[in-house]
C-alpha cells in the first residue's frame, strides 16, 4: 500500500502530537484564568448608580455607623438598602437643594423607589445570609473591602464559589470580636498582647480563639452544600 | 379514533376571550423536548454535535451574573424586615365555613398557608383546600375587572347602576323584588348587612344554594330537636365510632380538627416498655419521659379507638376503619334502623330486608356500642348527604347510648339565615324565567349555572333574565364563570387574602380575615359591594365609600359591646382596641364559639321517615354523587395543584371517573384490562367509557374499577368538566374528556336532580369506546424482581397488625428475614444510652455487610461533627391519606404542575407520593382494606444515590441530610436509577412556569426554582432547617461572645435573642423540639409526622423512633433511612364477621 502522506510531513505530525496537549492545556489555563479574571467576575467594578452615593464621605469622613442605614444586617439574610426615608432624615436639613440629590427628593415626593444597581451580584441559587456572618464575627470589610475609602461602591471580591469556600474552610483568617465587626480600621494587633506569646495577637491566633468563642462550626459542616444552596 | 390521538380538531367552543386567557395559556409546551420522529443514528449525532456546539456557546457567557436592580422602600413599614417572612392569621373560607390559617408573607407576597395552632378547627393542621387557596390568589385566569354585557366597565359605574336599580332618588331603598343568591354564609358582617337589607326591602329574598350542602343534616337536626342547631363531635373522647357514609376525616368544615382528635387515639406508644411489659400491661422498668400525644400501650385495647365504617364509595375514613361494610346508599338507612333497634332505640321506623353481610354486622356492632365500659363514649355519625330521617335516627341512637352532650355536642347554629325571607333555588329560577323578580345579586362562590340540579334550568332562566334590559343582575365572583357570563354585570371579587372579612369555623369560632396584599386586580368583596347600599349600618344611599376594615370593625365593636355591657364609656374604646388587636393577631375571636345547647330529643323525631328506599330495579345501578376530594364542587377546577393531585384512594390525576366495584364491572362485562387499578408503571390506563343515564339525561364517563366499592352502585365525583373555569380546566384539544369536549373530566351535574341530589337509580351501559386516565399509583414502584426466580419480591412497604399481635410481639414490624440487621440498626439511630461504653474501635452502627460506603460526613471518624442529626418519623396508624402534605410540600418547595400528558409518562414532580396499598380479597368489597404510605426521600445515611453521581451534585451533609445541589446537577439520572425508594424526580421538560407573572409572585423565595434537566427530591425542607439554625447559631454566638462580666450582669440567664450553649452530656440540643416544622409536618391534620434532632432523646422524633413498632422502609438494604415509619396497629373487634 502506498503511503498517503509524504515523508516531509513527519515533523509536522510530531509537532501536532506534542502540540495538541499543549494546546489543550493552554486552552484550559486560559479558560480558568479568564473565569477568574476581574472582567468575568466583576471584581473591582463600580457600577454607575442613579445617585452618586459615597461611602467614603458618609462612613469615612462623617463616621455614620453601617447599621444606621443597613438596619437588618443583624436580623436578616438580606442587609437592606436603606429606604429613601433614611436619606431624607438628614437631607431634609442639609444639602436639601443639591442637584446631586434630586433623584432622592424625587423618589420621596413621588413615593417611587430609587433603582440602585446591584454591586454584589450573587447567583440566585446561592443563599448568602448576612446576619449569621455578622453574629459570628466576620467584619464587613472582609467581603466589602475598605468601604470607608470607596466613593462609588465597588465589588471588592470575586464572589466566586472558591472565594466563599476558602473562608468556610478557614474562618479563623477573618474572625474578629463581635464588637469590631463594623470597624473599618480594625486589625488583630488591636486586641492587645496574646497572653500565650506575650506578643500582639496575630490574626490567626486570635481567629482560632474566636472560632471557639463564637462557636463557629467546623469546616466539614460549613462546606455542606445545603449551607448555601437550597 | 383513539382518545389520545392528536388529530382531533382543536375546537374550543367556549373559548375564553384572549384577554382573560393571559400568558398562562402556554404553560406546558407539549412535547417541547420530544423528537417529532424516531431519531436515526445520523440525526442523533447531528443533534448531539449541535448541542455540544450550543453548550460551548452557552458556556461562554462572559459576564455570568446579569446586572440586577435593588429597589428599596421609600418608607419602610415597621413590621417588615426584608428577607424575613411575616406570618398573619386569617381563615380560609370554603362553602361558607372558615378554617384558621397562618399565611406567610414574603416581602408582601402571600406565599404559603399553614394551619393556625390556636384555631380550634385547625390545631396547626390544614386541609387541602386551605393549603391550595394561595394558588387561587395567583390564578392567571382570575377576572381582572368589572364587565358589563361583555365590555369592560368600572367599579364606579357598576355601583351607580346597582344603586339606580335598588335605591330611589331620595336615597331610600326601593321595595323591589331583590333576590340575593349566596352560598352558606357564616360571616357575621355579611349576615348583618344582609339582615339589614332584607329588613329594609320587604320584597327582597335571600337564596342560599350550595351544590354540596349539609341541608339534609340541618333538616335532620330540626326533626330530632325541633330547632336548628349544629353538631360538634368530640372524636378524642370516643372509644367507638360508627360512620354511616360520613367522611369526617376527609371532608367538611371540621375535618382537620376531627382528624387530629381521631388520630390521637390511634398513636400507640409503648413509652419504653418491652414486649413482656406490654403483654402484661405493666409499667416500664425504665419508663421514658411521658409525652402528651398518643396513648399508652398498656391500655391499648381499652383506649385505642375503633372505627366501623359503612359506606358506598371508599373514603379516607373507610380506609382507616377497623371494619368496613360496603353497601349501597339505599341500604344504609335500612342498616341504621336495624342497628337502632338492636341498641334498644324505641319507635324506630320499620326497615326492609338487609343483605347477609350487613345482617351479620348488626348484633356484634350493637353489642360493642352497648358495652357498659363504653359509657357513652361512642359516636354514630352520618354523612351530610344521607336522608334527614337518617340524621334524626343517628341522634336517637346517640341519645340512647348516652353520647349526646358527651361526645356529640349540640351548639347554636353557625350559619346565618333570616326567618321568613329565605327562598330556594327552584323558586328563584321560576321567578327569573318568568322575569317577575327585579334584581339579582349573586355573591361570591355560588355558581348555579354550572351546579344546579338538572331539573332546575337556572342557566336558561338567568340568560333570559340577564338579557332583559329592565332587569338588573350582578355577579360578584373571582372568575367570569358559567354564571357570571350570563349576568348583566360582573364585578371581580377580591380573594380572601386581599381584603378584610370575617368567617366562622365548624364550631362557630369566628376569625377576622386580614388582607396581606392589595387586591391584585382591584377586586371587591361581598361586604364592600353591599356597603355601597348602606348608610352606616342601615341601608340607604349615598353611603360614604368605606374601607372594608371599618365595616368589619363596626360589626365586632357591636359584638364586643354587647358582650361587655358593663363597660364604662371611657373604657369602651381602649378595651375594644385591645380586643380587636388580639383577635386579629391570634386569628381567633375569643369567646365566639357557638354556645352549647342542651336539647332533648323531640318525641316526633321519627315521624315522616319514609319506608326504607326500595333497592334499584334489576337492570339499574345506584349512582352516587359526591364532591370531588380535590376540586370540591368545581370551584377549584382551575387550581393546577388540586387538578393534578392524585385523588386520595383512586390516585387519579386530572380527571374524574365512574367508580365501581370489581363485581359490578364484571356484571357490566367490562374488559379485564380495566381491572388494573394501578395503571402500570407509566400510569396510563386505557379504560372503558360508560354511558350513564338518569331520568333521560345521559353522560359518558370513564369506568374505574375501585376495590372496596359497594356492589350494585357507582359513584361519580362532581366538580369536573367545568366549561368556563380557565386554562387549567380546559383547552387541551388533544386531551378531550370522555364526551369529546375539551374540558378536564366530565360534568356529572346534568345527572343530578333536586329530588335525588345524592343518589338515584341509573342505567349504565358500556359504550365500547375507551378513554385514558392518568393514575399515579404504579409510578416509581419499589418493586424488584428476584434475579434468580424472576418473581416480584414483596418489599412489605406497609407493615400492619392488630393490638393482639402487637401485645404478643410489639416488634412485629421488624420482620425477618428481610431485616435482620434492621432492628438494631434503627435503634442505633438513637443516641447511646447513658453509661454506654463503646468497647469496639469500629462504629457498631454499620452493618458488616455494607454495600454502600458511609457518607463522608457520617463516617465513624466524623461523628464528633454531628452536632445535629435530623430525622423524621411517620405514624402510619394516624395517616388518613388525605394528601394535605402533598399540597403543602408543593407550595413550600415550588414544585411544578406538569399536566396530564406528562403524568401519564410518569413525570409528575411531587416530592411526596402517597402510596395506597390494598389488602384483602378484591371480590369481596367488605374485606378490602386500604393502607396509605406517604413516601418521600428517606435521607439514607448510606445513600445509594450519592455514590453514583458523577459530578457530586448529591452529597451528604454532616447533619444527615442528603443534599441535592441543583446548580451542580447535569442530569445523568444515575441517582434516580439507583434510588431504591424511587423518590427522585427529574425535570424532563421546563415544567416550571417562567412566564406567568402572577404565578411567579406566589413562589417561595427561599427555595431555588428548578429548570429543565435537573434532578430534585425532598430535602426535609432544608430551607426551614437552615433558617432555624441561623437564628439559633446567631443567638448562641451572641451569648458566648459576651464577656464573663456581661454574662454575670445578666445573672447567667440568656435574655430573649440570646441562647445558651447546650450540654450534650445532658442530652441538650441547641434547637429545641418543635422549632423546625417541615411543610408536611405542619400541614398534617392528624399530626402523623414528626421531625427533629435525633441527638435530643426527649424529642418526639427520638421517642417515636424508639417505639418497638417503628421500622425502616427497605431497611434490609442497609441504607439506614432517617425517615422511619411506625407500623399500622388497629383494634379490630374479634366478634365481628
Image (spheres, rainbow, N blue to C red):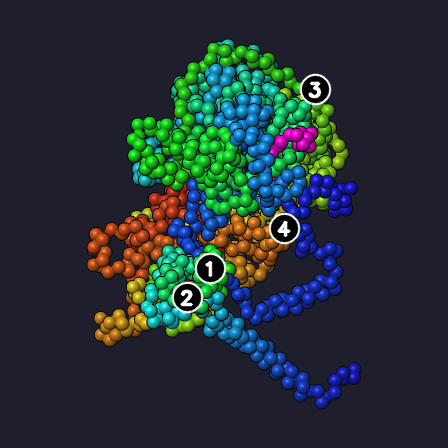
Residue B508 falls in image quadrant: top left
Q: Which of B627 and A23 is in front in this view?
A: B627
Is mark 2 in CB contact (under 8 Å) with mark 3?
no
Residue at mark 1: A107
Residue at mark 2: A97
- Report the mark closest to the observer, 4 or 2: 2
Q: Is residue B351 left or right of residue A67?
A: right
Chain under disc 3: B
Measured from the top left, where is residue B10 in percent x and y?
74, 45
Distance (Cα) linking label 2 and label 1: 14 Å
- Report the mark closest to the observer, 2 or 1: 2
Q: In this view, does B969 lie above or below B736?
A: below
Q: Are marks 2 and 3 on the same chain?
A: no
Distance (Cα) linking label 1 and label 3: 79 Å
Q: Would you say residue B465 sits in the magenta stretch?
A: yes
Q: Which residues are the magenta region?
A: B463-480
Q: Residue at x 70, y 63 (%)?
A: B47
Q: Do labels 4 and 2 share a chain?
A: no
Q: Is residue B784 left or right of residue B418?
A: right
- Report the mark closest to the observer, 4 or 3: 4
Amino acid at each position: 500500500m502506498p503511503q498517503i502522506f509524504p515523508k516531509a510531513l513527519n515533523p509536522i505530525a510530531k509537532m501536532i502530537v506534542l502540540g495538541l496537549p499543549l494546546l489543550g492545556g493552554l486552552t484550559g489555563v486560559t479558560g480558568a484564568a479568564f473565569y477568574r479574571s476581574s472582567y468575568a467576575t466583576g471584581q473591582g467594578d463600580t457600577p454607575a448608580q442613579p445617585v452618586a452615593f459615597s461611602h467614603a464621605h458618609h462612613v469615612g469622613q462623617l463616621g455614620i455607623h453601617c447599621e444606621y442605614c443597613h438596619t437588618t444586617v443583624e436580623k436578616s439574610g438580606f442587609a437592606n438598602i436603606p429606604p429613601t426615608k433614611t436619606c431624607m432624615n438628614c437631607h431634609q436639613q442639609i444639602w436639601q437643594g443639591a442637584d446631586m440629590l434630586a433623584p432622592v427628593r424625587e423618589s420621596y415626593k413621588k413615593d417611587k423607589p430609587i433603582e440602585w444597581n446591584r454591586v454584589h451580584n450573587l447567583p440566585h441559587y446561592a443563599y448568602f445570609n448576612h446576619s449569621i456572618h455578622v453574629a459570628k464575627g466576620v467584619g464587613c470589610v472582609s467581603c466589602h473591602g475598605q468601604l470607608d475609602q470607596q466613593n462609588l461602591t465597588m465589588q471588592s471580591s470575586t464572589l466566586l464559589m472558591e472565594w466563599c469556600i476558602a473562608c468556610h474552610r478557614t474562618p479563623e483568617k477573618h474572625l474578629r470580636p463581635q464588637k469590631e465587626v463594623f470597624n473599618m480600621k480594625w486589625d488583630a494587633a488591636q486586641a492587645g498582647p496574646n497572653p500565650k506569646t506575650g506578643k500582639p495577637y496575630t490574626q490567626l491566633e486570635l481567629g482560632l480563639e474566636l472560632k471557639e468563642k463564637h462557636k463557629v462550626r467546623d469546616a466539614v459542616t460549613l462546606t455542606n452544600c445545603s449551607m448555601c444552596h437550597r | 379514533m383513539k382518545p389520545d390521538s392528536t388529530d382531533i380538531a382543536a375546537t374550543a367552543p367556549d373559548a375564553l376571550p384572549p384577554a382573560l386567557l393571559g400568558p398562562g395559556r402556554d404553560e406546558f409546551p407539549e412535547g417541547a423536548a420530544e423528537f417529532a420522529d424516531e431519531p436515526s443514528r445520523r440525526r442523533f449525532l447531528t443533534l448531539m454535535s449541535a448541542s455540544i456546539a450550543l453548550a460551548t456557546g452557552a458556556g461562554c457567557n462572559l459576564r455570568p451574573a446579569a446586572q440586577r436592580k435593588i429597589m428599596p422602600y421609600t418608607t419602610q413599614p415597621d413590621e417588615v424586615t426584608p428577607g424575613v417572612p411575616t406570618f398573619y392569621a386569617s381563615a380560609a373560607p370554603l362553602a361558607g365555613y372558615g378554617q384558621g390559617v397562618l399565611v406567610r408573607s414574603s416581602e408582601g407576597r402571600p406565599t404559603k398557608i399553614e394551619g393556625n395552632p390556636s384555631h380550634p378547627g385547625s390545631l396547626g393542621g390544614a386541609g387541602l383546600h386551605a393549603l391550595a387557596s394561595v394558588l387561587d390568589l395567583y390564578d392567571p385566569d382570575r377576572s381582572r375587572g368589572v364587565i358589563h354585557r361583555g365590555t369592560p366597565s368600572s367599579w364606579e359605574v357598576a355601583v351607580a347602576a346597582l344603586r339606580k336599580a335598588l335605591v330611589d332618588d331620595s336615597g331610600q331603598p326601593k321595595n323591589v323584588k331583590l333576590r340575593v343568591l349566596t352560598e352558606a354564609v357564616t360571616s357575621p358582617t355579611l349576615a348583618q348587612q344582609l339582615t339589614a337589607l332584607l329588613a329594609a326591602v320587604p320584597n327582597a329574598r335571600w337564596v342560599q344554594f350550595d351544590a354540596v350542602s349539609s341541608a339534609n343534616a340541618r333538616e335532620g337536626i330540626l326533626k330530632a330537636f325541633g330547632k336548628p342547631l349544629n353538631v360538634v363531635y368530640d372524636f378524642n373522647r370516643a372509644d367507638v365510632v360508627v360512620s354511616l357514609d360520613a367522611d369526617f376525616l376527609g371532608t367538611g368544615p371540621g375535618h382537620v380538627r376531627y382528624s387530629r382528635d381521631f388520630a390521637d387515639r390511634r398513636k400507640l406508644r409503648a413509652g419504653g416498655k418491652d414486649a413482656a411489659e406490654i403483654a402484661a400491661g405493666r409499667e416500664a422498668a425504665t419508663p421514658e419521659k411521658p409525652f402528651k400525644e398518643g396513648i399508652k400501650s398498656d391500655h391499648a385495647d381499652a383506649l385505642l379507638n375503633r372505627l366501623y365504617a359503612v359506606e358506598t364509595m371508599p373514603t379516607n375514613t373507610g380506609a382507616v376503619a377497623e371494619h368496613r361494610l360496603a353497601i349501597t346508599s339505599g341500604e344504609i338507612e335500612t342498616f341504621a334502623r336495624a342497628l337502632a333497634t338492636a341498641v334498644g332505640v324505641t319507635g324506630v321506623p320499620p326497615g326492609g330486608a338487609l343483605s347477609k353481610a350487613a345482617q351479620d354486622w348488626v348484633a356484634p356492632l350493637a353489642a360493642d356500642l352497648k358495652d357498659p365500659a363504653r359509657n357513652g363514649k361512642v359516636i354514630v355519625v352520618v354523612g351530610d348527604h344521607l336522608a334527614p330521617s337518617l340524621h334524626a335516627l343517628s341522634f336517637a341512637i346517640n341519645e340512647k347510648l348516652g353520647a349526646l352532650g358527651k361526645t356529640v355536642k349540640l351548639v347554636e347554629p353557625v350559619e346565618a339565615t333570616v326567618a321568613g325571607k329565605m327562598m330556594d333555588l327552584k323558586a328563584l329560577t321560576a321567578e327569573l324565567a318568568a322575569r317577575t323578580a327585579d334584581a339579582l345579586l349573586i355573591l361570591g362562590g355560588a355558581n348555579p349555572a354550572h351546579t344546579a340540579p338538572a331539573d332546575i334550568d337556572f342557566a336558561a332562566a338567568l340568560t333570559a333574565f340577564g338579557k332583559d334590559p329592565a332587569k338588573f343582575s350582578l355577579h360578584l365572583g373571582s372568575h367570569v364563570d358559567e354564571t357570571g357570563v350570563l349576568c348583566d354585570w360582573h364585578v371581580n371579587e377580591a380573594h380572601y387574602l386581599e381584603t378584610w372579612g370575617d368567617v366562622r369555623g365548624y364550631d362557630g369560632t369566628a376569625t377576622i380575615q386580614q388582607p396581606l396584599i392589595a387586591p391584585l386586580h382591584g377586586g371587591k368583596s361581598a361586604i364592600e359591594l353591599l356597603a355601597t347600599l348602606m348608610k352606616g349600618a342601615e341601608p340607604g344611599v349615598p353611603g360614604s365609600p368605606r374601607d372594608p376594615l371599618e365595616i368589619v370593625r363596626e360589626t365586632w365593636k357591636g359584638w364586643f359591646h354587647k358582650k361587655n355591657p358593663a363597660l364604662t364609656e371611657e373604657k369602651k374604646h381602649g378595651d375594644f382596641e385591645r380586643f380587636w388587636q388580639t383577635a386579629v393577631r391570634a386569628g381567633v375571636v375569643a369567646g365566639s364559639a357557638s354556645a352549647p345547647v342542651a336539647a332533648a330529643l323531640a318525641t316526633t323525631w321519627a315521624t315522616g321517615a319514609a319506608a326504607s328506599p326500595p333497592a334499584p330495579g334489576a337492570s339499574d345501578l345506584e349512582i352516587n354523587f359526591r364532591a370531588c376530594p380535590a376540586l370540591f364542587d368545581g370551584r377549584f377546577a382551575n387550581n393546577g395543584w388540586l387538578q393534578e393531585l392524585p385523588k386520595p384512594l383512586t390516585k387519579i390525576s386530572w380527571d374524574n371517573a365512574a367508580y365501581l366495584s370489581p363485581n359490578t364491572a364484571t356484571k357490566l362485562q367490562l374488559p379485564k384490562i380495566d381491572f388494573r387499578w394501578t395503571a402500570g408503571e407509566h400510569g396510563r390506563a386505557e379504560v372503558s367509557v360508560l354511558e350513564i343515564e338518569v331520568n333521560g339525561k345521559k353522560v359518558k364517563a370513564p369506568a374505574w374499577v375501585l376495590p372496596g366499592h359497594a356492589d350494585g352502585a357507582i359513584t361519580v365525583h362532581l366538580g369536573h368538566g367545568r366549561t368556563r373555569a380557565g386554562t387549567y380546566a380546559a383547552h387541551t384539544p388533544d386531551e378531550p374528556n370522555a364526551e369529546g369536549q375539551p374540558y378536564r373530566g366530565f360534568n356529572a351535574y346534568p345527572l343530578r336532580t333536586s329530588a335525588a341530589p345524592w343518589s338515584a337509580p341509573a342505567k349504565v351501559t358500556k359504550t365500547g369506546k375507551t378513554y385514558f386516565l392518568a393514575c399515579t399509583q404504579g409510578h416509581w414502584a419499589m418493586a424488584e424482581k428476584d434475579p434468580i426466580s424472576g418473581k416480584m419480591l414483596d418489599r412489605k412497604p406497609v407493615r400492619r397488625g392488630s393490638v393482639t399481635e402487637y401485645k404478643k410481639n410489639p416488634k412485629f414490624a421488624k420482620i425477618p428475614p428481610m431485616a435482620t440487621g434492621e432492628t438494631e440498626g434503627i435503634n442505633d439511630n438513637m443516641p447511646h444510652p447513658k453509661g454506654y461504653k463503646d468497647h469496639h474501635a469500629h462504629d457498631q452502627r454499620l452493618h458488616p455487610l455494607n454495600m454502600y460506603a458511609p457518607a463522608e460526613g457520617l463516617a465513624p471518624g466524623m461523628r464528633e461533627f454531628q452536632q445535629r442529626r435530623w430525622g423524621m418519623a411517620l405514624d402510619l396508624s394516624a395517616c388518613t391519606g388525605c394528601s394535605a402534605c402533598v399540597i403543602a410540600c408543593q407550595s413550600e418547595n415550588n414544585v411544578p404542575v406538569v399536566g396530564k400528558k406528562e403524568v401519564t409518562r410518569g413525570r409528575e414532580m411531587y416530592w411526596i407520593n402517597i402510596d395506597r396499598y390494598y389488602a384483602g380479597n378484591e371480590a369481596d368489597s367488605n374485606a378490602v382494606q386500604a393502607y396509605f404510605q406517604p413516601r418521600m426521600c428517606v435521607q439514607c445515611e448510606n445513600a445509594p444515590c450519592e455514590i453514583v453521581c458523577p459530578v457530586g451534585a448529591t452529597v451528604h451533609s454532616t447533619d444527615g441530610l442528603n443534599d441535592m445541589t441543583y446548580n451542580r446537577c447535569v442530569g445523568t439520572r444515575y441517582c434516580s436509577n439507583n434510588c431504591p425508594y424511587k423518590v427522585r424526580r427529574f425535570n424532563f421538560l421546563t415544567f416550571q412556569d417562567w412566564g406567568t407573572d402572577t404565578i411567579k409572585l406566589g413562589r417561595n423565595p427561599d427555595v431555588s426554582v428548578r429548570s429543565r434537566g435537573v434532578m430534585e427530591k425532598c430535602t426535609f425542607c432544608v430551607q426551614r432547617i437552615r433558617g432555624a439554625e441561623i437564628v439559633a447559631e446567631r443567638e448562641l454566638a451572641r451569648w458566648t461572645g459576651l464577656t464573663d462580666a456581661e454574662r454575670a450582669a445578666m445573672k447567667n440567664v440568656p435574655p430573649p435573642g440570646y441562647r445558651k450553649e447546650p450540654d450534650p452530656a445532658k442530652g441538650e440540643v441547641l434547637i429545641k423540639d418543635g422549632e423546625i416544622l417541615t411543610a408536611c409536618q405542619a400541614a398534617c391534620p392528624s399530626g402523623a409526622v414528626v421531625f427533629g434532632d435525633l441527638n435530643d432523646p426527649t424529642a418526639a422524633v427520638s421517642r417515636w423512633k424508639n417505639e418497638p413498632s417503628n421500622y425502616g422502609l427497605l431497611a434490609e438494604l442497609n441504607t439506614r433511612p432517617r425517615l422511619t415509619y411506625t407500623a399500622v396497629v388497629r383494634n379490630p373487634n374479634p366478634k365481628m364477621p
